[in-house]
Image (cartoon, helix red, strand yellow):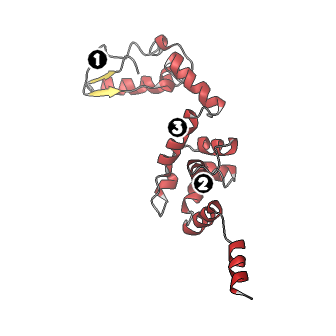
Amino acid sequence: MTEESTQEEKKAIRFKKKELFEVMLCETCMKMCTDYCCTGNVSKSELIKPNGRALVTYLHNKGIKSYDDAGINALFYCTLCEACEAHCRPNVNAPGFIRKARAQVVELGLAPEPIRELGLRVLNTNNTLNEPHEKRFSALEDLIPKKEKAEIVYFIGCFSSYREIEIARATLEILKKGNFDFCVLTDE
């Protein structure tokens, strides 16, 4: 074998950059986080695990592969529970990059339809449930103090205002019976 043919052989078996990245990712990560990823375990999909989401994000940001439906779904299936971060040996902030990747997806106009619908609901009615904003506290008015400042501000939220009213009522009753100095934001 000549030196020239040896050089040609070496060139023929080289990995492309994106292939090398995939190999490096697989070899360097112990993937301890994947055992704790609730959505990854339920779906049984490698793409819906933190390392799959990282790969989708990396490939897009390096200009190798644009976000596609499967990658976008993988990003939005994440519950941001942070279990992956708690078990990550390289200490990667996966929830942080997932949030940023989601923001990119939204900015590109590629957000899944349910996410777009949710955003429109918030813009139109100030809540995710598409309920009339002016009726937010109608079932709780008897327990809400009529003041704007206090030591404690109780953020009731959409679900406790519209769907799980008994949670808000119980919390307000505890705050009242405990003589806590509290108020509720008039416009959450």
Q: Amino acid at mark 1?
A: Glu
Dot 1 alpha-carbon crowd within 10 angstroms: few under 14, some 14 to 19, many 20 or more:
few
Q: Which label's residue is closer to the chain start, 2 or 3?
A: 2
Q: Specify which label sits upstream in the sequence, 1 or 3.
A: 3
- Near-viewer residue (118 or 181): 118
For residue 103, the mark is 3
* Residue placed under numbered mark 2 in the picture: 55
Q: CA distance from mark 2 to mark 3?
A: 17 Å
108 left or right, relative to 183: right
Q: Which one is nearer the viewer's eye here, 136 or 124?
A: 124
Residue drawn at (48%, 12%) of the image? 135
Circle 3 crowding by C-alpha within 10 Å: few under 14, some 14–19, many from 20: few
Name the kind of residue labelled 2 in the image: Leu
Please state the horizontal and vertical placement of residue 157, each as a whole percent of the image.
Answer: 45, 26
Kindly identify which numbered label has been placed on residue 148: 1
Assign a secondary structure to mark 1: loop
Q: Residues within 10 Å of mark 2 (few under 14, many from 20)?
A: some
> Which residue corresponds to the image point at 46% horizontal and 52% vertical from the top-left?
93
Q: Quadrant of residue 150?
A: top left
Residue 166 visible in this rendered orientation of the protein = no
Secondary element at image label 3: helix
Measured Cα–Cα span from mark 1 to mark 3 = 33 Å
Instruction: Pinpoint residue 52: horizontal percent, then vertical percent.
Output: 62, 54
